[in-house]
Amino acid sequence: MHPAIQGLLTIAFGVGGCVGYFYFSNLVLDRVIFPARGAHIARNIRRANMIRPWLFLLPALLALGLYLAYPVVETLRLSVTERVPGGGSEFVGLANYQQMLAEAKFWEALQNNFLWLLVVPAASTAFGLLAAQLTDRLVWGNIAKSLIFMPMAISFVGAAVIWKLVYDARPEGTDQIGVLNALYIYFGGDGPMRWLTIPFWNSFFLMMVLIWIQTGFAMVILSAALRGIPEETVEAAIVDGAGPFQIFFKIKVPQIMDTIVVVWTTITIVVLKVFDIVFAMTNGQWETQVLANYMYDKLFRANDWGVGSASAMVIMLLVLPILVWNVYNARREMR
Amino acid sequence: MNMIAGEKPALIWALRLSVVLLVGLWLFPTLGLLVSSFRTSDQIATSGWWRAMFPSEQNLTLRTDPPSTQMQEGDLYVIEGRLFAEGTSSEISAWGTSAREPAAYEPGTSAELRRGGTLTVAADGTYRLESAEEISGKRGPRVFVTATVPPEFTLENYETVLISGNSTDNMAKAFFNTLTVTIPATIIPILVAAFAAYALAWMEFPGRALLVAAIVGLLVVPLQLALIPLLKFHNEIGIGKGYIGVWMAHTGFGLPLAIYLLRNYMVGIPRDIIENARVDGATDFMIFVRIILPLSFPALASFAIFQFLWTWNDLLVAMVFLIDATGETTVMTKQIVELLGTRGGNWEILATSAFVSIAVPLAVFFAMQKYLVRGLLAGSVK
């Protein structure tokens, strides 16, 4: 069967199945199990209303449980087991973790991940704040914003191609077709540099791609927050003789601090999962390895599920504080 | 800011200039890809794309017409013609007959060829090759020219990538595969999430607060954790690698955000509307279909855009759950990564492929930006 027809069938089946499920399960509940008539009408309606929420929730809970909750537990289990030849697995305790901690590549990945965590959220938020403030109240500010926001729609792989062209190097003496090398030579550099192969600094060239993508996201949210600042606070500062920089740093930034934190943590989560950029541009060569790519290497190249799962747990561990903080905030809000 | 800036024109100009600079900086890399996709491989390899708009000086290796076109004029054998294609206006500043001295002669002068005969090349590229004996060989002699070539753009790359290219270059199949992955993976989670969000927003039941908290928690669970357990699961239930698996995976991974966004939006719908409907005897199912769904359109649209962009641009989920050893079901992102690996130097194919894959999300982005922004704000400022 042609995949497109299969796709259409799936849409029809999925949508029809969903609607059918919700419709008929409600019908059965109201007409057959707890009919709203007869001697126990009040009790039946009450019971039907107790069950109904779970009918609405069931498909979502199944999918969430199977695709997100169960894998966390299963990955934890896999990380303390080792596959044995001929199928099955055996418990090996922390051996996978020990093996992982003994690998130089793992430490390189961890170190790079921390570097990414340090640089990318900070730079994206700073650029985003700058762009939001500069375009605020500019007549053509919205056009400028939508152009800075545009990379959000571009895939990490597409962005990798775009930036590979920027970093491209041609042999010495010929015209450079990468902008960075062209500028470098124009301003007196000795010769073309192969930017992505310079250890330590190449990580920053990769980070630039993510910063380029995430700045638009930060800008959109911070710009809405800036708009929400009460006019009077700014006016009062002007009356008191504050300069534009003082207004920005001492009046505006403190008032949107909560939003800045939200933006920062959201980008932090993106950074922890960053995979495509490194995979497409260097594949972890020249000391650019990051955790997500290290994990992919272990799982699908080395076929070592134990160590791969162990490194996935490390990513989970790094996300955990943010998860707890988010849940804590959500619970506080619900009250 | 307005008032202060209003007093200092210099500051306004500094402000505008920095915005222009910032936008330029952000647009420049993408523009490079777009321009490159319309250039030939020679042009891309010899000059930066930012020079594509201007006539450029290039060193070219060309050939005269083959000896089969020679004519006899008296006792001379002659080949006449033009080095450049008809209708182009390139101008030669120097030329030569050997690779060691590619700029030995001025235009308009004549040179002796090593294998006999005299070649005269004019500035506009017309040449005359004279020889006392019959000119032999299959191809005409090589001519090295330094020429100023006018900007020239071509659609050839797009033709290769979309229609005529061989299996590694042609993106048509990957394009349709991507579409096949994306559409069900966008529609199905919306429906499942909408019902769940309604229950979480408007139905009273024990454990509701706990469920909402759990969904907020699942929002940030890295999908890396799900790869192996789910691949195992898919193999056990017999669907292995394929479309069904990738649709299910995208549905699962998209649900937390969908439920979260939709619930936050549905909570904001005025209580009166729903209670009036209840009083009039509407069931929850009817309220949901007739009232909640139409009113939640903006939130549904925001999530649809998110999910579309995310599934279209995805690489990891497709590699793990969809693409098998035959490569029949490859998606565009995967094919581009492969091109990067095997044909890293072929910028014309690479740039065009990348642009084909980002064109659809960009179109969606510009057409529906309003909903995207609204979704972002609802999703993170709460």
Image: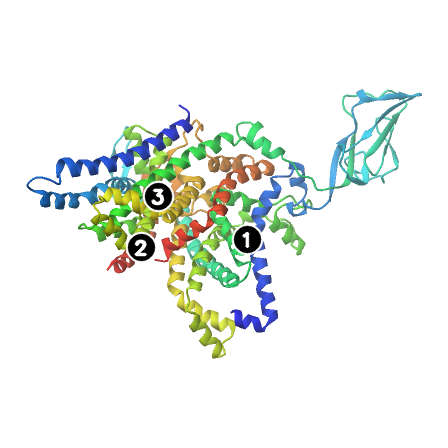
Circle 1: residue type: Trp
Circle number at residue B6: none
What residue is disc 2 on? Answer: B268
Contact flag, marks 3 and 2 (Cβ < 8 Å): no
What residue is disc 3 on? Answer: B254
Q: How is the image coloured?
A: rainbow
Q: Secondary structure at mark 2?
A: loop
- First reached walking from the N terminus: tag 2 or tag 1: 1
- First reached walking from the N terminus: tag 3 or tag 2: 3
Where residue A200 appears, x then y in whole percent?
Answer: 50, 52
- In the rendered image, residues at marks 3 and 2 fall on the same chain: yes
Q: Chain of mark 3?
A: B
In-image side of A19 versus B100 (left or right) = left
Residue A173 visible to the viewer: yes
Q: Secondary structure at mark 1?
A: helix
Closer to the camera: disc 2 or disc 1?
A: 2
Q: Chain of mark 2?
A: B
- For the N terminus of chain A, the image quarter is top left
What residue is disc 1 on? Answer: B26
Residue at the image point whose x is 63% and y is 35% from the top: B155
Circle 3: residue type: Gly
Where residue A101 appears, x then y in whole percent?
Answer: 35, 48
Q: Residue furthest front?
A: B280
Q: Bin the neighbour count of mark 3 within 10 Å (Cα to Cα): few under 14, some 14-19, many 20 and up.
A: many
Circle 2: residue type: Gly
Q: Nearer the viewer, residue A247 or A211?
A: A247
Quadrant of residue B179 within the rendered picture = top left
- In the rendered image, residues at marks 3 and 1 fall on the same chain: yes
Where residue A289 appears, x then y in whole percent?
Answer: 44, 46
Q: Nearer the viewer, residue B338 or A60?
A: A60
- In the rendered image, residues at marks 2 and 1 fall on the same chain: yes
Q: CA distance from mark 2 to mark 1?
A: 36 Å
